Image: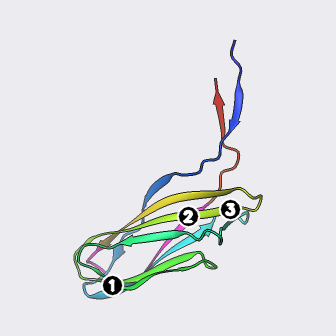
């Protein structure tokens, strides 16, 4: 006969890709892009002992004007770049570290893809991302 064992696992590493709303800008425009991390509930918070990291890759011919900076209190990462008019994708590869008030902490990899189009007049662009910890992931092993 078989025994059902209930196993609790901590999911530590995983990466997901999120395609954000497109940015509609004009050529030769400077644009400030912000990734805003929003807690899904009042029980989770960013871990300031392991601040999240992020790496920005711009479309080939666009240039970084203001290097990426992090405001942990606001849970926001922002940078400014000059858009040269050639459409493409910005990739922001993030490694997030956040904790539940109960003490469980997780690390999560998120790659944000931001399509850039040469058909608008935006000078700022914000991507909101809700983070949360799913507690007690249950797996039944037969």
Please say whether residue 137 is one of the residues in the magenta stretch: no
Q: Which residue is mark 2?
A: 96
Q: Residue at x 28, y 72 (%)?
A: 59
How far across and down, in percent of the image, does residue 98 sit?
A: 64, 63
Q: Residue at x 36, y 70 (%)?
A: 22
Q: Position of residue 9 (x, y in %)?
A: 65, 42
SS label for mark 2: strand
Is 82 or 7 nearer to us in this picture?
A: 7
Q: Quadrant of residue 41?
A: bottom right
The tag earlier along the polypeptide, 2 or 1, is 2
Element marked by disc 1? loop
Contact, mark 3 vs mark 1 (Cβ under 8 Å): no
Q: Which residue is mark 3?
A: 99
Say which residue appears at 65% left-offset and 51% top-offset: 134
Q: Name the residue: 65% across, 70% down.
A: 49
Quadrant position of residue 7: top right
In the image, which is nearer the foreground, mark 2 or mark 1? 2
> Of callouts 3 and 1, which one flags the residue occurring earlier in the amino acid sequence?
3
Q: Quadrant of residue 129?
A: bottom right
Q: CA distance from mark 3 to mark 2?
A: 10 Å
Q: What segment carries the magenta color?
A: 117-131
């Amino acid at each position: 006969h078989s025994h059902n064992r209930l196993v609790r696992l901590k999911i530590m590493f995983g990466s997901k890709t999120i395609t954000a709303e497109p940015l509609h800008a004009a050529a030769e425009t400077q644009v400030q892009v912000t990734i805003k991390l929003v807690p899904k509930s009042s029980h989770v918070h960013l871990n300031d002992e392991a601040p999240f990291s992020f790496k920005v890759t711009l479309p080939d011919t666009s240039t970084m004007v203001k290097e990426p900076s992090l405001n942990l209190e606001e849970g926001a990462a922002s940078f400014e770049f000059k858009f040269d008019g050639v459409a493409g994708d910005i990739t922001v590869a993030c490694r997030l570290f956040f904790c539940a008030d109960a003490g469980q902490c997780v690390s999560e990899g998120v790659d944000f893809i931001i399509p850039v189009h040469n058909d608008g007049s935006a000078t700022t662009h914000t991507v909101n991302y809700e983070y949360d910890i799913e507690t007690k992931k249950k797996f039944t092993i037969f």
